Image (cartoon, grey):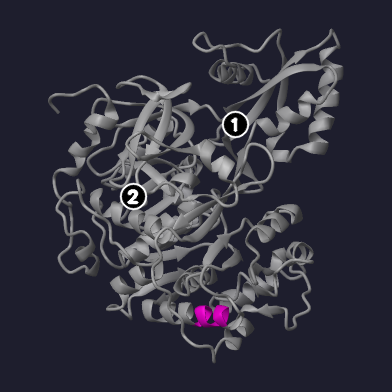
Amino acid sequence: MNNKTGYPSIDRPWEEFYKYGIPNKPDDMPWKKYLVDDTAIGAKPPQGLTMYQLIYDVNKGYPDQIALNYFDKKTTFAEMFQHIDECARALTAAGVKEDDYVMVSLVDMPEVVYSFYGANKIGAAVNLIDPRSDVVTLQHYINQVKPKVFITLDLNYPLVKKAIVGTSVEKVVIVRIDDSMPAAISLGYKLKSRGQHPKIEYGDGVLKYSDFIAAGAGAPEVEADYEENACRIIVHTGGTTGLPKSVMISDQITNNVAWSYGYIGFPIKRQQVWYNELPPFIIYSMMISVHLPLFYGVTVVLNPEFSVEKFAKNFKKYKPNYAGGVTEHWRQLIRSPLMKDFDMSFLIAAVIGGDACPREDEIEINEFFKAHGCKYPVIKGYGMSETSATVTTETCTANRYKTVGIPLPVHDIKIVDPDDTNKELKYGQIGELLVGGPNIMLGYLDDQEATDEMIFTDEKGERWLRTSDLAKISEDGFLTHKGRLRRIYITDNAGTGAKIFPSVPEKEILRHEDVDAVCCAGRLKKDSTFYEIVAFVVKKNDRPDDELTEELVKLCQEKVPGYMQPVAFEYIEALPLTETNGKVDFVRLEERARELQLADI
């Protein structure tokens, strides 16, 4: 690129990768009318459609093709839309209207798809809930949106039962994991899980999903029109303090993401396979691993269990062309005996998100892929709930070690001085990443103060979101993630991905009368891509380390979730500070945490 200014947001060097048309664009795809421009530069996503309307429009001509696969029970597009219609009528019969909210606390299963699009069809918003949420958190979510209907796993009903007391919830709809399994597999599951499911007294206010659907049989069919900037999805992002915040996402935002992926060069074809075990309450799951593949007519394999240990087995079984996960999924896969001499030529996109992929892992994974017939390297990306999943991604032509790719066509990015968002930094300089464009969230529900802290409008009238992540941009537009201003570490919690917020244990440790200061820093667990934290403590006195550690361990055990508890306590004279702004130098502490690990501490 000639005549560079030195500022990425002005030069937009990543656009060079979008100038060469749409690779592998089939001629017979119904979605081609939404990718009418040869390049993404200046192109516009489909406008004025709900999520339901978009996937119906591109798939209605293929009624017998497979939309969903759940334990080898395959659901055609015609059957999926019938189930969606039935759920929409059931919600209508239950009194749900346009702009109401429907609580959905499920795992990856057909009913989460039917509920998601059924609510969207009638103009309601789906509030995606983590089934692990406690009663206090559930009550917070309920009181925020005042729903009439709460759709939940039977395993979580005891908590939901307590949470709905005195609230707006009129009907609880119970779904079992085996409801949509093939008969033989369902029988095996029932025998294996005998005694693990709660006894539920069904009645007018507590219904099996099948009875809920039956109750809506006579209800009128309602299809809401598209409404600009209306909230249609809520996901929850763990706040560093207090209760999680509720992120509001619109139809247009969700459709924009699906459209954008058409320009990054994957040879997407109808009836390819996308494997998904990422929980639906994570925005990436429903937006990237459900809505996106359905937009392109790709079959979605739904697995209700998030398990890095079983990933290789399921991968070998389903042979997906696309699959997303954290680094640990792919590390486990390439080490599995099941993969020895296994032909992986079918694999197009092995996507890694959630946290940084160490360079040595990326090299090892790519070498394994190549040796097993896969033509494509692993795909890394960056995103967050507030940016509607993906901000940057690697593509078929833009893939580089230690980076997280280039921006999707619907996103703008720039790097600024963390202490002055008006001061953009140049290529190669590390600062805070800002994300702009039409795909940042509408805002946090009922929290304008938090929204204003996250999003601001510049002098040109453009909205920008502060990510609190440190990054840099190369001269050809690749983003490299360098750490966090707001520290969050991805870890494992009972087999499921979870986030460690260091401020949670820090707050409790600071309550101790002998502690003057504390900072928790993360490091990778041994032979893992999940994190653990070490607490660096400054004492107020000369209290013996062993005595204080014993008390702090007990304090954390009582007040802090197990996966967020420090694995070690290190006592130091003072917290290290950066030379530039005098703030705590988290990077130095993270380095020290790794050094301690080498010393078996």
Please give the range of residues in magenta. Answer: 86-92
Specify the amino acid type for callout 1: Lys
Which residue does the numbered mark 2 point to in the structure image? Answer: 349
Give the side of residue 443 with respect to residue 36, left or right: right
**Disc 2 to disc 1: CB gap under 8 Å:** no
Q: Which mark is residue 525?
A: 1
Q: Which mark is residue 3?
A: none
Residue 464, picture quadrant: top left
At label 1, counting other C-alpha atoms closer than 10 Å, the crowd grade (few under 14, some 14-19, many 20 or more) is: some
Residue 465, picture quadrant: top left
The residue furthest bottom is: 218
User: In this view of the protein, can residue 316 be seen by the observer?
Assistant: no
Of the pair 3 and 174, the residue shown nearer to us: 3
Looking at the picture, how far across and down is residue 313, in whole percent? 49, 56
At label 2, counting other C-alpha atoms closer than 10 Å, the crowd grade (few under 14, some 14-19, many 20 or more) is: many
For image coordinates 50% across by 41% down, the residue present is 328
Q: CA distance from mark 2 to mark 1?
A: 27 Å
Looking at the picture, how far across and down is residue 54, in whole percent? 34, 68
Specify the amino acid type for callout 2: Ala
Of the pair 301 and 41, the residue shown nearer to us: 41
